[in-house]
Image: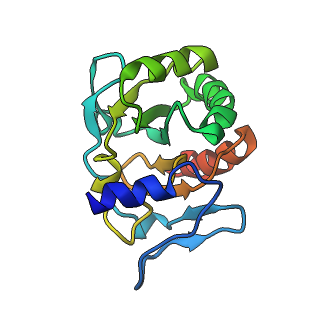
């Protein structure tokens, strides 16, 4: 309960700081994006469940692709601002080895989430996570989502390569994706 309360307090922010002590291996960029060198990345946790349209989804099925995970809520103003850019970039990169997946959180039903995706032209799947349990699967001290919106880029090997704790436009999103996509 305390973790869910903490997520509620930090939700829907504009930027944030990385928590966790010790040698986390990630570098905080001056553009709000944290990155980890390829050899130091943590494996993404199990991100599976039911989508907002009732289908089953497991992000691990996309291993071999670069996966962009966006944590969002229909109630979140910055999420509404960035949705058009995520829809645009996801379409531009769907045939280039990039898969987008949303994690819809804190919506009390799927109806507003489905309406949000229709309104903003989002065509990629979104896991339905009303209580934030998927966010809590990330280990402390890693590139974990801490506010809403949060965006993560998972490399082809299923490891978290980059994280943004703020709303992104297409330029910011591509700055996160392109270096990971260029990796062999």
Q: Quadrant of residue 59?
A: top left
| x, y percent for residue 55 | 28, 18
- Outermost residue on the bottom side: it is 22
- Outermost residue on the right side: it is 171
Q: Quadrant of residue 33?
A: bottom right
Whether residue 89 is visible to the viewer of this picture, yes or no, is: yes
From the viewer's side, name the closer residue of 184 and 133: 133
Q: Residue at x 31, y 64 (%)?
A: 139
Left or right of 40: which side holds 84? right
| x, y percent for residue 174 | 67, 43
Q: Residue at x 25, y 46 (%)?
A: 46
Quadrant where the image shows the N terminus: bottom left
Figure disc tally: 0
From the viewer's side, name the closer residue of 178 and 130: 130
Q: How is the image coloured?
A: rainbow
Q: Residue at x 52, y 57 (%)?
A: 162
Identify whether 99 is placed above or below 113.
below
| x, y percent for residue 76 | 57, 38
| x, y percent for residue 83 | 63, 30
Whether residue 43 is visible to the viewer of this picture, yes or no, is: no
Identify whether 62 is placed above or below 137.
above
Q: Quadrant of residue 93?
A: top right
């Amino acid at each position: 309960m305390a973790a869910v309360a903490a997520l509620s307090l930090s939700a829907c922010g504009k930027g944030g700081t990385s928590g966790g002590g010790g040698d986390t291996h990630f570098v905080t960029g001056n553009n709000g994006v944290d990155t980890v060198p390829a050899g130091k990345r943590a494996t993404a946790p199990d991100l599976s469940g039911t989508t907002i349209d009732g289908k089953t989804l497991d992000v691990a099925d996309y291993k071999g692709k670069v996966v962009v995970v966006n944590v969002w809520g229909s109630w979140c103003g910055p999420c509404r601002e960035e949705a058009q850019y995520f829809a645009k970039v996801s379409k531009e990169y769907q045939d280039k080895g990039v898969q987008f997946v949303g994690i819809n959180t804190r919506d009390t039903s799927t109806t507003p989430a489905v309406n949000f995706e229709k309104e903003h032209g989002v065509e990629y799947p979104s896991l339905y996570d009303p209580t934030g349990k998927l966010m809590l699967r990330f280990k402390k001290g890693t590139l974990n989502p801490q506010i809403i919106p949060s965006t993560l880029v998972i490399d082809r090997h299923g490891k978290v390569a980059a994280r943004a704790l703020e709303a992104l436009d297409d330029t910011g999103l591509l700055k996160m994706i392109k270096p990971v996509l260029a990796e062999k």
